Image: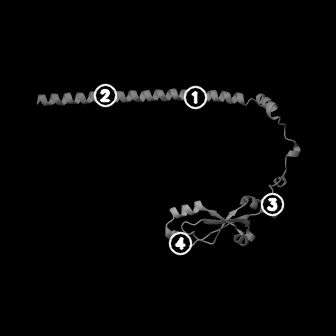
Amino acid sequence: MSKLAATFWLGLVVVTVFTTFKVKHAVQDIEEELNRVRKHTVAEQQEVRVLAAEWTYLTQPERLAELNRRFLQLGPAATKQLQPRIDDLPLRPLPAPLTDVVVAAQPPPAPGGPATVRVASAPVAAASASVASATPVPNRALAAAAALLAPRAALAAPRPAVQLVKTGANPLDALIAQIAEAR
């Protein structure tokens, strides 16, 4: 029984020593990390002080006035430059009228034959007339890409006759112009 008790107490001492050793090294690692963070904080505070001093130097009124005199020659705003009401501010010029781009689709080309694309740009009112007047443009690269990439069933599928794409001025400018006209 005394051998068993001695082995138990010896094992308990070994486990306690090992645990104490691990805790000591963990505490030392945490202290080293704390010292690193403190040094980094001091360096950051020093950098903030330097940047504050630079900002103070760069924004000195005398220095800014000298730079203005040397490079910009700006003066105080005259009273005639100030507008008492927002209605007195000039608006942008009215935008150009909206136009449509008309693209006429062609039936798929015969295998090995050249593909054609018709493109015309016209105002909205003349869109239907411009489809008939568009000139065909041969495009061999388009035909080759269609033959290689598209399956035969997709080439035989019907395509829409005309596709319209809106282009033109910014709708926000048109809205501002409508508001100005309403006044």
CB-based contact (under 8 Å), mark 1 and mark 2: no
Q: CA distance from mark 4 to mark 2?
A: 82 Å
Q: CA distance from mark 3 to mark 2?
A: 82 Å
Question: Of the residues under marks 1 and 2, which one precedes in the sequence?
Answer: 2
* Most distant residue in the right direction: 80
Q: CA distance from mark 3 to mark 4?
A: 52 Å
**Element at badge 2?**
helix
Label 3, residues with CA under 10 Å away: few <14, some 14-19, many ≥20: few
| Residue plotted at (81% across, 56% down) | 93
| Residue plotted at (73% across, 64% down) | 99
CB-based contact (under 8 Å), mark 4 and mark 2: no
Q: Amino acid at mark 1?
A: Gln
Question: Of the residues under marks 4 and 2, which one precedes in the sequence?
Answer: 2
Residue 36 versus residue 93 in the image, above or below:
above
Q: Which residue is mark 3?
A: 180
Q: Amino acid at mark 2?
A: Thr
Q: Which residue is mark 4?
A: 156
Q: Which residue is mark 1?
A: 45
Q: CA distance from mark 1 to mark 2?
A: 37 Å
Which quarter of the figure has residue 79? Answer: top right
Q: CA distance from mark 4 to mark 1?
A: 73 Å
Q: Nearer the viewer, mark 3 or mark 1?
A: 3
Q: Quadrant of the C terminus?
A: bottom right
Q: Which residue is mark 2?
A: 20
For residue 73, the mark is none
Q: Amino acid at mark 3?
A: Ala
